[in-house]
Amino acid sequence: MTVAASEAPRRLFRDRREALIQPTVLGATGIEWLGSFALMTRHNALLGILGALVCAHSMVVAAYLLHEAAHQALFASRRANHWAGEALNFIAGSAYASFARILHMHIRHHVDRVDPTCFDFKGLMARHTAVRRTLQMLEWGYLPATEILMQLQVIGRPFFVRSQRRHLARVVMMLLVRLGLLAWLWSLAPRAVLFYGLAVLLQLHVLNFFDAFHHTYDQLVVTPDQPIPLGGRDRAYEQANTYSNVISQSHPWLNALLLNFGYHNAHHHRPSVPWWRLPALHRQLYGDQPAALMPMRELLVTWHRNRVKRVFAADYGSPREGSAGPGSNRADDFVGAHGVSFLTVV
């Protein structure tokens, strides 16, 4: 008897290698996240700081695994990607917005070839100079204030914006759950809450650093389903305005610490390719072309120099063409972006 195609069992993974790698990384991320709290609650400051670093890394990896799930690259099953995405969303600290909302806006980023956002944070700064100056002052002090604002708007807008009211129940539920867990953590060790806060700040810095220098797209304020005319933004435009910022070319294993997210040109060329295959795809497509890779050292310099300007910059700037002269870097004019994280543009 032949089983109908619709009744055939669905595979959870596409091949044996994926079945080995993805559960291992998912399990390690969960263990790392939970284990970090064991370190942060110990009565030892050094262990607490170590716990904050471990927690920050687990939350960054959770965010990038969520990104994998959004591209259906984590599992072969769409349902499995959805539920894994929701769990990873909680670990990443961004569960106030549903995985479905995050997926929708991120796919728009790929299809429309822009950086879309539903919250006009620059308009807020233009209307309220005090907000802009506060953000710039905090960013000068290396606090990721703009990214914190983007996190807070996801929580706050359902309370005050009528069109966002349908998301209010989820926000309230997540606030109760997460505040309850923080209260429990405080009862175990009050300074563990401070260590967790440090982990969140580190996570936001890492996510923003890599997001800041991936594109020279237009940043547009839109509603979730508002059409955006392509206007000539074809595949050639996409690659010409996309940049890769790997941690290290000489030590590729370091890039795996952040799930190879820096291989961004390769990711945009084939978004469904899983993270562990991106280095090979990058070499196949680009080799070691300097145009496709921005050196980490140069990006760290421009990230530091432009940390205040980036808050309210009119555009992202762009890398210089060709090689830079003595004492300068290709990235000197690459100001970078704020407010483009796939976790908070909803």
Image: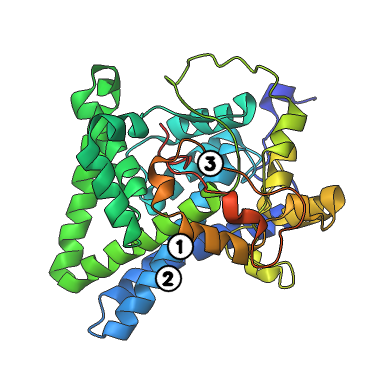
Disc number placed over residue 54 in the picture, else none: 2
Residue at 71%, 68% in the rendered image: 252
Instruction: Give the amino acid type for the residue marked by disc 2 in the picture.
Output: Val
Q: Position of residue 56 (x, y in %)?
A: 41, 64
Question: Which residue shows up at 49% across the image and 62% down it?
Answer: 29
Q: Which mark is residue 58?
A: 1
Query: In the structure shown, which secondary structural element does the residue marked by tag 2 occupy?
Result: helix
Give the left or right position of residue 68, taking residue 314 as reference. right
Above or below, 148 relative to 39: above
Q: Which mark is residue 16?
A: none
- What secondary structure is found at the residue carrying circle 3? loop
Q: Is residue 292 above or below residue 98?
A: below
Mark 1: secondary structure: helix
Q: Residues within 10 Å of mark 1 (few under 14, many from 20)?
A: many
Pointer 2 with pointer 1, Cβ within 8 A: yes
Instruction: Quadrant for the C terminus, please.
Output: top left
> Mark 2 against mark 3, which lies toward the viewer?
3
> Which of the two residues, 339 or 110, is positioned nearer the viewer here?
339
